[in-house]
Amino acid sequence: MLFRSAAPGISIFHTIDWARSIAEHYRHIQPYGILIERDGRVLGGAATALISSPFFGKRLVSFPYAGFCDPLETEPGVIPELLRQMLRLAAELRASQTLFKCRRPLSSTSEVRLREKARFKHHFIDLRPGKERVWEACSRTAVRREVKRAEKGGVILRAGNPADQPDLLSTFYSLFFMARRRLCLPVMPAALFETFGKVFKERCWVATAFVGDAPVSGAIGFLHGKDFYLEFAGDSPAGRETGANQLTYWRAIEKALELGCDSFSFGRTSLEDEGLIRYKRHWGTIE
């Protein structure tokens, strides 16, 4: 099984809801969970999935379509045992690779040797100082000025739960689809986002910015515990020219603050994407 708890350290990517949503639309992905227990207490766990591909064979990954999904421990020294169990599971499933998508570094042990495959940065905003401090930490020119420009320019933002506003979700997806195609990235199916709305309900938030009647920027985020994850976004050229992107992100941050969140996740970014890293740094993020 995967995790049901919203306890510290457990992200949205560790949950049953995330795993079921992904597996429903990707039949080649089969979720697995590993728990280590002692005397009725859970000492650690890992959320992972087997990906079967005719081109790349079988891989055990923690977790597909997740920014990060670290193995977790409640007591020191449990992680090495988790790694051993994951490797045993990979052998049973005849997976040729075991991949860990981690926010924090994992260390090799005498029994488990790890090799870095790709490097990413994860960007977060600490929301605990409050709205005014979070706003002041943003770049004056790259963020705050653009948000004000969008507001003065009449950019309108509509937001809500995607299950209650399917038209808004559809509009977001059209922007997401165009952006992924423009960047030559795989496009996730529209039905997956519909499932997110149904499964996560009030924990899912979608927003689309309009210039007149034209949608120009959109994003979808998720609430889990005290954390807000802005995982998917898309735009048109007008979204970058009008400040609509910054307005959309800022409204997402305001929503997270309204919900009482402690952190706001911008997701992970490849170290090779210097432009996106620079953009996220403009928001006063922690890496």
Image (cartoon, grey):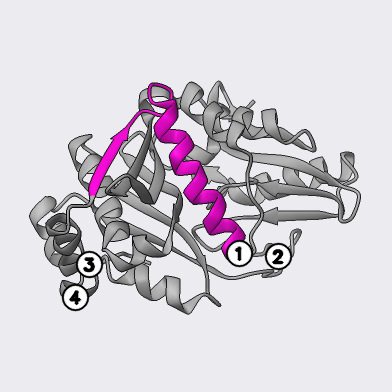
Residue that numbered label 4 is attached to? 141
Mark 4 or 1 closer to N-term?
1
- Measure the alpha-carbon separation of dots 4 and 1: 40 Å
171 in the magenta segment: yes
Which residue is drawn at the image coordinates 58% and 64% (left, top)? 182
Q: From which residue to which does the magenta span run?
A: 156-183
Q: Residue furthest left?
A: 132
> How many neighbours does mark 2 have within 10 angstroms: few (below 14), some (14-19), or many (20 or more)?
some
Mark whose residue sits in front, 4 or 2: 4
What secondary structure prevails in the magenta region? Answer: helix
59 in the magenta segment: no
Residue that numbered label 1 is attached to? 107
The amino acid type of the residue labelled 1 equals: Ser
How many numbered discs sit on the rendered protein? 4
- Measure the alpha-carbon separation of dots 4 and 3: 6 Å
Q: Is residue 55 left or right of residue 21?
A: right
The amino acid type of the residue labelled 3 equals: Val
Which residue is drawn at the image coordinates 32% and 71% (left, top)? 281
